[in-house]
Image: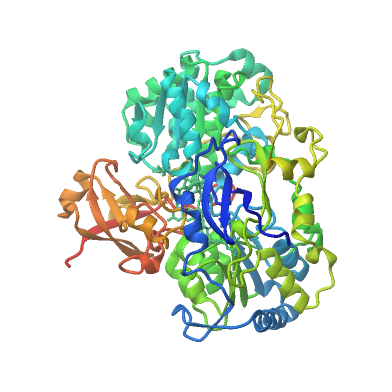
């Protein structure tokens, strides 16, 4: 490894669309300061509050610095330190024992603790593929939205971040960028200064919604109805761009007929808003030339999340907003980057590739999978699980089942981590991992159009090792004879991009190392003349692929699983819809253990409207219990009209053990999956709330 550098160029590794470029100052081998790189256009020299505190996290006294072996009961979190030699031997012998008997009894569990392509799914995937382990469907976050985009536009592609500041209208739909995409918010504010109108579409008056000109507080999970209502008005009032529709879209007639069923009055009733709001939003959108939609994943965590994404994605093609660089839509820019997934993950190492692959377990049903129950029961019982880049005991839905699954005495659990999270408490073996400042990585972004390189700034803290090195170490002990498992991080990073792709304009690895990032060459208005990466090359109102799969080719509104419409009896018992979107000072469950950030969040809260609080005898500041058939959690009530009527809001994701009652919002969320993409339905969740005597 290179000698630690005095200054290093790094990349924020967190699951955030902004993927900031960072400069790290190192003194005596310690990172003392990180700042946003002023030269990187999306970052503009600014980091968010969480990551400005990065050195506090990296050099935190609670960092895991040696391998640990369990001595207490599962869940107790009692361990003894052991050496790497003993740790790797234990891991190798237990995994060998399981895969010799039944490869699919081994399951990886990981998500986006780091978004790095090397420390994410490269050596790790190759390792599990070679062993023939069960595959994991990585669907906890964005899979419904990604499927919605794929069926409509052909891929996760959209507007450039930079052009939002020139937009005349921005719909901030299902996102709270002040908390979760600060650098987009900077652009939106610039647009506002230049006279743009900002509209938030969100059941909650979030920090962002309160700063927009208008806020449409619809019921959770009703976004598809709102979009279809807008389409209804746009067509009725002839606010569509007929030339664009004729030349660059397919399925207009079908969409028109579908939208006829969504009159503004019906939509108002479904969404719990005023009829005028639907009509005025459609007119505003249809009459503004540079109309942009910043869609975010908050709106797709419900049964109909995929269809809702499709319905919304139709809007800029109907009005021809795509003709302008400052018009169109951005949910994810992920697929602009020419990432070579095959080279990184080597699916060809899978037994049976490409026809008969090992079973795939949907990560949102990990609770049932570990308990060998429900829809997740198919194939062998899970006997070993390796968790990295994720904290499932805190973040996965239906948490009581997840915890019960991890508590199984006959399950062998390895967790690679920085800290002793809720999940680590259930591990048999804990392996200390390096942070972004200690390893090499390469990144794409889902919010901008640059690829970036992260150089190690300091030596590993304690005995921590990069994920890649840990998997290489286990593979060596298992005596797996496959060169792809032993490639160095630099070799993997160099192979991560398709260097011959036109978007890289002939740039080289050396140029990336020197500058720290490369701007991708993507047209300013990428779909001004169609050219969508769909089978038809057009924006597909009616999807060719959905039709082929025998499914409804047109977008529709599907009521939430847990709603008065779809489940009246359930709704009678549990009349309040709960959403648990990101808290500003946490990043999913990361940073919850950083005292200064947790102090700013205070304690778990539940925001409830005065009209819902009064009949339940709940006053501001009371401790309340939120519950349904799956479980319960306690929180301090904030009686406020930030939450619309019928909806309660618990900003998340708390570590359970750092919450007063050892519980968090996922006690009540469900393992049900979305319509498209098999994604999670965290915000499709009915509860009841009661005061607790203390
Ligand atoms: N500070 C911070 N930043 C983060 C994260 C974090 O935890 N903390 N998480 C990161 C991750 S993993 C992701 S995926 C991204 C995006 O993460 P998202 O989960 O999309 O988060 P937000 O941008 O906060 O937007 C969520 C907003 O959607 C609203 N919402 C909930 N249900 C509905 C609905 O049915 N319809 C509509 N229209 N709105 C709804 C919520 O009230 C909330 O204001 O952010 C990333 N950035
Ligand atoms: N109720 C509710 N639940 C939710 C959500 C919600 O809005 N509400 N949001 C969902 C969403 S969008 C997402 S994306 C998921 C996110 O869930 P996760 O992907 O599990 O994200 P984190 O909670 O941030 O946990 C990531 C863990 O990875 C560790 N880590 C970071 N870098 C490395 C590394 O290099 N090596 C190793 N070994 N470990 C590392 C961190 O220390 C951290 O503990 O949560 C979902 N859960
Ligand atoms: S979390 Fe997002 S805004 Fe904060 S530093 Fe990382 S990429 Fe930038
Ligand atoms: Mo996410």
Which image quarter: residue 565?
Answer: top left
Which image quarter: residue 158?
Answer: top right
Quadrant of the rendering where the N terminus is positioned: bottom right
Residue 543 is at least partly visible in this image: yes
- Relative vertical location of residue 569 with respect to residue 423 in this rendering, above or below: above
* Tally of numbered discs: 0
User: Where in the figure is residue 208, as x and y percent of width and height?
Assistant: 38, 36
- Relative vertical location of residue 382 with respect to residue 691 in this rendering, above or below: below
Please indicate whether residue 167 sits to the left or right of residue 414 in the image.
Answer: left
In this view, the residue farthest toward the bottom is: 71
Foreground pick, 229 / 653: 653
User: Where in the figure is residue 41, as x and y percent of width and height?
Assistant: 59, 33
Foreground pick, 27 / 51: 27
Quadrant of the rendering where the C terminus is positioned: bottom left
Instruction: Please name the residue shown 48% across and 68% down the image.
Output: 421
User: Where in the figure is residue 181, as x and y percent of width and height?
Assistant: 48, 40
- Relative vertical location of residue 399 with respect to residue 530 in this rendering, above or below: below
User: Where in the figure is residue 155, as x and y percent of width and height?
Assistant: 66, 38
Residue 382 is at least partly visible in this image: no
Which image quarter: residue 415?
Answer: bottom right
Instruction: Please name the residue shown 49% across and 60% down the image.
Output: 57
In this view, the residue farthest toward the front is: 28
How is the model colour-coded? rainbow
């Amino acid at each position: 490894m290179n000698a630690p550098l005095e200054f290093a160029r790094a990349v924020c590794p967190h699951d955030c669309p902004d993927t900031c470029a960072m400069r790290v100052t190192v003194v005596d081998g310690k990172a003392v300061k990180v700042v946003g790189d002023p030269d990187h256009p999306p970052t503009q020299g600014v980091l968010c509050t969480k990551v400005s505190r990065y050195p506090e996290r990296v050099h935190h006294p609670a960092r895991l610095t040696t391998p640990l072996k369990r001595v207490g009961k599962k869940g107790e979190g009692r361990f003894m330190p052991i050496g790497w030699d003993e740790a790797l031997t234990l891991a190798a012998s237990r995994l060998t024992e399981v895969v010799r008997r039944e490869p699919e009894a081994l399951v990886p569990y990981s998500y986006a603790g780091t978004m790095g392509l090397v420390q994410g799914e490269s050596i790790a995937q190759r390792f599990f593929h070679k062993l023939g382990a069960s595959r994991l469907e990585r669907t906890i976050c964005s899979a419904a939205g990604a499927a919605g985009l794929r069926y409509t536009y052909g891929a996760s592609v959209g507007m450039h971040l930079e052009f939002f500041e020139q937009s005349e209208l921005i719909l901030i739909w299902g996102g709270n960028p002040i908390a979760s995409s600060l650098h987009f918010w900077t652009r939106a504010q610039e647009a506002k200064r230049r006279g743009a109108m900002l509209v938030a579409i969100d059941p909650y008056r979030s920090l962002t919604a309160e700063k927009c000109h208008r806020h449409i507080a619809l019921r959770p999970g009703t976004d598809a109805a709102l979009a279809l209502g807008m389409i209804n008005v746009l067509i009725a009032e002839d606010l569509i761009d007929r030339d664009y529709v004729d030349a660059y879209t397919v399925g207009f007639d079908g969409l028109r007929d579908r939208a006829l069923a969504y009159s503004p009055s019906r939509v108002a009733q479904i969404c719990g808003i005023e009829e005028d709001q639907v009509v005025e939003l459609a007119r505003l959108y249809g009459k503004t030339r540079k109309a942009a939609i910043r869609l975010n994943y908050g709106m797709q965590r419900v049964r109909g999340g995929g269809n809702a994404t499709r319905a919304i994605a139709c809007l800029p093609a109907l009005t021809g907003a795509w003709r302008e660089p400052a018009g169109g839509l951005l949910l994810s820019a992920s697929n602009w980057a020419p990432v070579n997934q095959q080279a990184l993950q080597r699916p060809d190492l899978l037994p049976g590739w490409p026809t008969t692959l090992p079973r795939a377990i949907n990560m949102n049903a990990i609770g049932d999978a570990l308990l060998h129950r429900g829809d997740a029961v198919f194939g062998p019982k899970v006997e070993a699980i390796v968790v990295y880049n994720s904290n499932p005991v805190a973040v996965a839905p239906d948490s009581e089942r997840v915890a019960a699954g991890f508590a199984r005495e006959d399950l062998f659990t390895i967790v690679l981590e920085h800290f002793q999270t809720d999940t680590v408490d259930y591990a048999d073996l804990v392996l200390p991992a390096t942070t972004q400042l200690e390893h090499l990585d390469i990144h794409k972004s889902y919010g901008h159009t640059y690829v970036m390189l992260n150089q190690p700034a300091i030596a590993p803290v304690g005995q921590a090792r990069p994920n890649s090195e840990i998997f290489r170490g286990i593979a060596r002990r298992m005596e797996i004879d496959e060169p792809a498992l032993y490639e160095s991080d630099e070799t993997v990073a160099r192979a991560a991009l398709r260097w011959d792709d036109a978007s890289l304009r002939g740039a080289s690895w050396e140029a990336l190392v020197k500058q720290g990032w490369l701007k991708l060459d993507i047209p300013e208005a990428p779909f001004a003349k169609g050219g969508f990466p769909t089978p038809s090359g057009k924006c597909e109102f009616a999807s060719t692929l959905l039709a082929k799969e025998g499914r409804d080719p047109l977008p529709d509104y599907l009521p939430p699983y847990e709603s008065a419409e779809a489940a009246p009896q359930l709704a009678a018992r549990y009349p309040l819809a709960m959403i648990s979107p990101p808290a500003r000072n946490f990043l999913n469950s990361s940073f919850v253990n950083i005292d200064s950030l947790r102090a700013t969040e205070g304690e778990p809260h539940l925001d409830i409207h005065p009209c819902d609080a009064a009949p339940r005898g709940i006053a501001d500041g009371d401790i309340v219990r939120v519950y349904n058939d799956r479980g319960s959690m306690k929180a301090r009530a904030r009686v406020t009209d930030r939450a619309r009527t019928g909806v309660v809001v618990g900003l998340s994701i708390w570590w359970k053990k750092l919450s007063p009652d050892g519980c968090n919002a996922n006690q009540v969320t469900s393992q049900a999956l979305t319509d498209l993409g098999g994604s999670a339905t965290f915000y499709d969740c009915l509860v009841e709330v009661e005061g607790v005597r203390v």
